[in-house]
Image (spheres, rainbow, N blue to C red):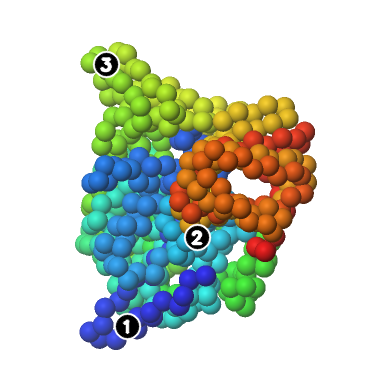
Amino acid sequence: MCLRPEVCRHRKGMVIKMNIILLSGGSGKRLWPLSNDIRSKQFIKIFKKQDGEFESMVQRVYSQIREVDPGATVTIATSKSQVSSIHNQLGEEASVCVEPCRRDTFPAIALASAYLRDVLGIGEEEPVVVCPVDPYVERDYFEAVKKLSDLAAKGESNLALLGMEPTYPSEKYGYVIPEEKSEVSRVVTFREKPDVSTAQEYIRQGALWNGGVFAYRLGYMLLKAAELIDFTDYQDLLSRYDSLTRISFDYAVAEKESDIQVMRFQGKWKDLGTWNTLTEAMEDPCIGKAILNEKCRNVHVVNELDVPVLCMGLKDVVVSASAEGILVSDKEQSSHIKPFVDKISQQVMFADKSWGSFLVLDVEDESMTIKVTLKQGNRMNYHSHERRDEVWTVISGCGQAILDGKEQVIRAGDVVRMNAGCRHTVIARTELRLIEVQLGRDINVHDKIKYDMP
């Protein structure tokens, strides 16, 4: 639980700090094999930093917010399946509002708004900005978001949107029609995703892309939520979240609100939802072990396997390899992979956890072999299994194993066995890597009982 942040009042001469809700939802299949039901696109590390290391979309966006407003209150609204990845990449201190189940954007925003008031202590007069967690943007985007927050703080309208200046007549986005072409204008209406010719007409009228970025005073959103959902506070809303109707924010609120302003944004903004658009943001053509010969043109490789990928004479192709599978696709065709991936049925082979990560190495009828990496100072839950035995072989680092309440130091070369029913955990004193062999007839993720630490 985060400590109560400093609450900034809107008095003349005082700096208004941002309260940002980052929407991090959805499972990723359009970026298979790097994304899956647990690992969404925003957690894939493909953006090179100045030190040569790679970071993910969520890490990039989070750091950009901190650059523009170091004191911003950032809360990530997400599903239970993503919490471990968020804490793995942003740290345990990251503020997370967890949806018990998926109910579309309006319930998620209502829950996060109640969380800001009732858990973080944000005042109802404070401005709040809602943004997707996965756009490809530069610093000027969050400078615009800061201006949008300030606009909402003034209370000149109930809702303030950030409209993206269109660069082409897109069929992928909804459109916002403003009254005039000034930087800030009243909104006339919204339009659904059009065909190309209709989009061209919208653009001639000065229309903007609806990028899903909007701001409001917290009290306004809580009032709207109370009108559509009968609840008293955050805990009450959370307890009956699974009974809420699925409905988008645009349909529930934005399209019905008559008092809206829109602010134009002309900087870089991309939705990296397909391999084709994602590779446009890659600085280098290859991530991981890959070789392209001199005949390759417009080829990108993302390889998470510890084996080399060799490409010869390819043009306009993306190659991606991970423990989940291998994709070789024409870039234009790569946006159509979802129905094919939907037919693929297999367990998750790699996942980030709050304590580190795991990689499945081998699956047999009565065994599974996994490589586990624990970050220094982290530990697994104290737990047991009813239908399987486990054997750990430590391959690097040192730590402490606890078996049925008894502690023992472990280091490279040590072997630890846990029979079914044994309560166990491991604590990493340094980064700790081990091979875990699970043995049993019915190995599955649901065979796990958690306990308090002894």
Question: Along the polypeptide, which appears first: circle 2 or circle 1?
Answer: 1
The residue lying at 34 percent from left, 76 percent from top is 153
The residue under label 2 is: 77
Task: Assess disc 3: are there few (<14), some (14-19) or many (≥20) residues with their C-alpha within 10 Å of its C-alpha.
Answer: few
Question: Along the polypeptide, which appears first: circle 3 or circle 1?
Answer: 1
- Disc 2 residue type (three-letter): Ala
Question: Along the polypeptide, which appears first: circle 3 or circle 2?
Answer: 2
Q: Position of residue 193 (x, y in %)?
A: 43, 45
Decide: marks 3, 1 in contact (CB < 8 A)? no
- Disc 1 residue type (three-letter): His
Q: Position of residue 320 (x, y in %)?
A: 42, 28
Front one among 308 and 268: 308
Considering every residue shown, the one lying at the far bottom of the view is 11
Q: Position of residue 294 (x, y in %)?
A: 23, 16
Quadrant for residue 259, please give it.
bottom left
Q: Position of residue 160 (x, y in %)?
A: 36, 66
The residue under label 1 is: 10
Q: Which mark is residue 293?
A: 3
State the separation of the CA atoms marked 2 and 1. 25 Å
* Element carrying mark 2: strand
Task: Assess disc 2: are there few (<14), some (14-19) or many (≥20) residues with their C-alpha within 10 Å of its C-alpha.
Answer: many
Of circles 3 and 1, which is in front?
3
Of circles 2 and 1, which is in front?
2
* Element carrying mark 3: loop
Quadrant for residue 103, please give it.
bottom right
> Is residue 217 something that shows in the picture?
yes
The residue lying at 55 percent from left, 70 percent from top is 225
Front one among 454 and 120: 454
Of circles 3 and 2, which is in front?
3
